[in-house]
Image (tube, helix red, strand yellow):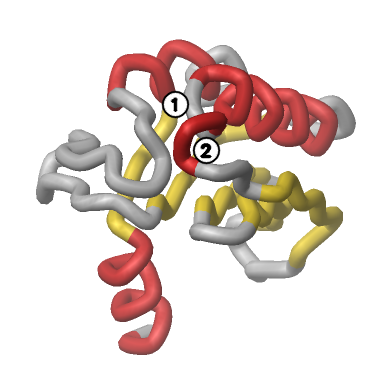
């Protein structure tokens, strides 16, 4: 069964889930508080990645999907850093150790979920 790591990075927390792709069943969850913007750099990305790695430890992960509370291009490139000052390459380098990564704007991810 294909397993995914889903990550929603918001203004107050990053919520993570280990998800069965076919059924959408959540096998386990984790959460990391979002620090103030001045502290939301690489250390926060490391904390999110460590939480994702813990979730991934029990399964073979096929993909990592992240929704982020920033402006994201249609090609998955982070174009702003108003709340979470991450760069696309940082996210891919850190989370790509688990599985291929897709980044989406949180508003587009929510709209897609509602449409489905």
**Local secondary structure at mark 2:** strand
Question: Where in the figure is residue 114, as x and y percent of width and height?
Answer: 39, 87
The answer to whether residue 75 is above or below residue 104 is above
Are the residues at dot 2 and dot 1 in contact (C-beta closer than 8 Å)? Answer: yes
**Local secondary structure at mark 1:** loop
**Residue at position x 60%, y 56% from top?**
21
Q: Which label was assigned to residue 112?
A: none
**Residue at position x 48%, y 25% from top?**
41
Question: Where in the figure is residue 12, as x and y percent of width and height?
Answer: 60, 60
Residue 18 visible in the snapshot: no
Mark earlier in primary sequence (2, 1): 2
**Residue at position x 80%, y 37% from top?**
55
- What whole-number distance in Å separates the C-alpha atoms at marks 2 and 1? 6 Å
The residue sitting at the left extreme is 74
Question: Where in the figure is residue 53, as x and y percent of width and height?
Answer: 75, 26
Q: Residues within 10 Å of mark 2 (few under 14, many from 20)?
A: many
To which residue does mark 2 refer? 64
**Residue at position x 61%, y 47% from top?**
34
The answer to whether residue 4 is above or below residue 47 is below
In this view of the protein, which residue sits in the foreground, 105 or 69?
Answer: 69
- Which quadrant of the view contains residue 52? top right
The answer to whether residue 107 is above or below residue 27 is below
Q: Which label was assigned to residue 100?
A: 1
Q: Residues within 10 Å of mark 1 (few under 14, many from 20)?
A: some
In this view of the protein, which residue sits in the foreground, 22 or 85?
Answer: 85
- Which quadrant of the view contains residue 108? bottom left
The answer to whether residue 89 is above or below residue 100 is above
- Which quadrant of the view contains residue 29? bottom right
Residue 76 lies left or right of residue 49; in this view the side is left
């Amino acid at each position: 069964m294909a397993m995914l790591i889903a990550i929603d990075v918001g203004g107050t927390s990053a919520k993570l889930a280990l998800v069965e792709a076919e059924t959408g069943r959540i096998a386990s969850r984790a959460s990391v508080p979002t620090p103030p913007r001045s502290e939301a750099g690489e250390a926060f990305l490391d904390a999110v990645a460590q939480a994702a790695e813990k979730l991934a430890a029990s399964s073979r992960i096929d993909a990592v999907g992240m929704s982020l509370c920033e402006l994201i291009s249609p090609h998955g490139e982070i174009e702003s850093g108003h709340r979470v000052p991450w760069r696309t390459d940082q996210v891919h380098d850190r989370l790509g150790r688990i599985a291929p990564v897709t980044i989406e704007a949180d508003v587009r991810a929510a709209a897609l979920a509602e449409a489905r």
